[in-house]
Amino acid sequence: MNSYFDSAIEYNRTNTINLAHSNDQSQSFSNEKNWEWSYLVRKCRNLELEESYDLYMRRLRVGYLSLFIFIQLQVTITHTLLLLTTPDITFVYVDMAAYIASGVVIWLILSVNFRSELVSKHGWVVYVSSWLAVCVMVLMDIGLNVYHATSHNFILNPIYDAYTLYAIYMFMPVPYLLQPFVLGSAVTLCYIINYIFVITSKEDNQMHSILNEAIYLSCVNLLGIFFRLMRDIALRTTFLDRRQYVEENLLLRYARDQERSLLLSILPNQIADRLQEDVKNRIERSKQQHQQRSHVDTQRTTDSQNLKRWRQPDHGTLFIEPHEDVTVLYADVVNYTHLTTTLDVKKLVEALHDLFVRFDIASEEYNVLRIKFLGDCYYCVAGLVSPNADHAKCCVDLGLRMIKDIRDVREKRHLNIDMRIGVHSGDVLSGVIGAAKWQFDIWSKDVDIANRLEATGATGRVHVSQKTLSLLDGEYFFEDGTEKAREDPVLQKHGIRSFLIKSLRAPMHDPRRVQRERQAKKLSEANKSNFMHNSTLHQYNQVRNQAKLEMCRELDKMPIGRIKLTKVFRRSTRLTQDEIEEETFRRNISSFCLFFRTRNWEMQYMREPDVMLKYSIALAWVIYMGLLTIQLLSKDPISVRDTITGTSMALPLSCSPCC
């Protein structure tokens, strides 16, 4: 029996290990796929980011080009100064003139790319200027070689071949990968042809030298292509990360807006603000108390209490506000008790849902705040959230609308139901009570009076008090209240005289009524398209379109390199908030080898897997085979060649198992 359990435990352990291993493999495969160039390009196209990415790359290429012009200036000055140190200075005047002239021409040609408006209108300017600049560099280098070979019988190797190829792949503003490869291949072919005609014209049997030159330049092209590809992968990954950051920020903002809207659908604005501020303060105090605790057992025993009590109010803290001059409406479904015993529960709930949805829409149209509904009772208040001089008229109009809506539901669902509505104007107290579950409500004697007016009213009529009637400005036909209302002890106690609203009088040209009707019409049209606005697809498209607009703004914030020559010419010393954050982040990185100054950050960064390392090692092996071939084709002694080959093979062989 023990062996059976042991084998079962071992089987479960093996399955757990295999499952974890398979999850690690799937996670590793997913990480590698996220760094594939084709996958990144496809993802950018699916997210409609290619246009934004091209704009960012245009800025980045201009930044690289400005750095290249600075490097070209330093190379020209350094090379010219070195030529002045030659023993026979009479032979270098032509070289100095050629280097200076070519440098000036290259600067003039490439300066066109700094005119963003011209480049955006005419895309061919980038290609033409890059080709012309490279042609000047190649012609200068090859031309001096041919000049010395023919004039002074000097066989000199071109010295700017690798420099020109690296300039093509790293600094020239030619976009994408195919165009730099074509330009680099053309430059490589020019140098090989020059090598064939210049070297072989002076020496015989130099085929191995030509092959060495071809292999060397091919390896330089491979390095340039690899740099372009890796840079594009890194930039696309960074660009997609920034896009994800923008989208998540928008989703967070949208979630906060939804939370705010949900809260405002339950509470008035001023109460919601106070409650949110109070909850925020309680969470901060809870965090501070949690940090101050030192004993672990005390922390465990009090955590659950904090989670339950963080919403409880302090002693003496009440979220109650007085409101004067408001109107309260109570509505009750007549014959609801009989329906609960005769109608199916599902049909009853569907009918109530249909009815209360209509009431909610109508209350929004007439600017009336629904408090809550209890069973078949629905009550609301006007003039509570914001001052409204027509609060009584809004409630009476809402009551007439509710009677119409319930009769439509009665005909639609074939139910024997109607409404009884009571309306009264006065003063109330509104606020939130409760700790674990908040409940917003209103209290006052005027609320009780409105409730009694509903209970003593007539079916299908709006029952109002004399105070409410005095606020209607004679816009409605009315008659005396019910006999039941005159005998009600609560209404008699407060001296309330009631009236029944018959209908609206002939339309009067009252500007306030016209404004209320226009507002009701606008809200009604907005509610018709409410489904589309609340649908998930519409929300997704809205967030995606907003993310595209935000991404256009983020392009100006994204950095274009650690070295920015534009800062040298900037007159203003005031930095934006994004530049301040970027500078703060860069202070944590050392300029030497780009190490994090914080040791924990550096260790955490070093533990991250490098999914691109295998491609670097593969390229290193290709370059190594090219160097080995060059070494085998050389005329060095066999012993020296074997020593160099054996030594050079040790490092790649030792690194390959790690990848």
Image (cartoon, rainbow, N blue to C red):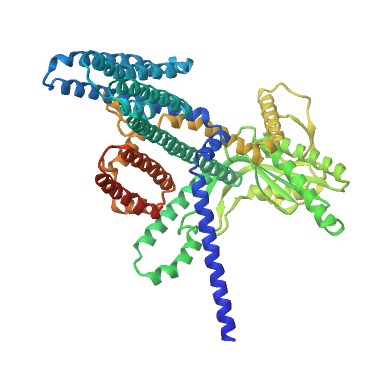
Q: Is residue 51 left or right of residue 281?
A: right
Residue 117 seen: no
Q: Is residue 619 left or right of residue 250?
A: left
**Residue furthest front as drawn:** 204
Residue 528 seen: yes
Residue that appears at 80% across and 48% down: 351
Residue sitting nearer the eye, 270 or 381 = 270
Residue 310 image position (x, y, % from top left): 47, 59
Residue 414 image position (x, y, % from top left): 88, 46
Q: Quadrant of residue 381?
A: top right
| 397 vs 295: above or below | above
Residue 392 image position (x, y, % from top left): 67, 36
Residue that appears at 40% across and 18% down: 131
Pick the quarter of the image with the N terminus: bottom right
Residue that appears at 25% across and 42% down: 637
Residue sitting nearer the eye, 134 or 322 = 134
Residue sitting nearer the eye, 345 or 125 = 125
**Residue furthest left as drawn:** 87
Residue 525 image position (x, y, % from top left): 70, 30
Q: Is residue 237 left or right of residue 337?
A: left
| 543 vs 300: above or below | above
**Residue furthest bottom as drawn:** 1
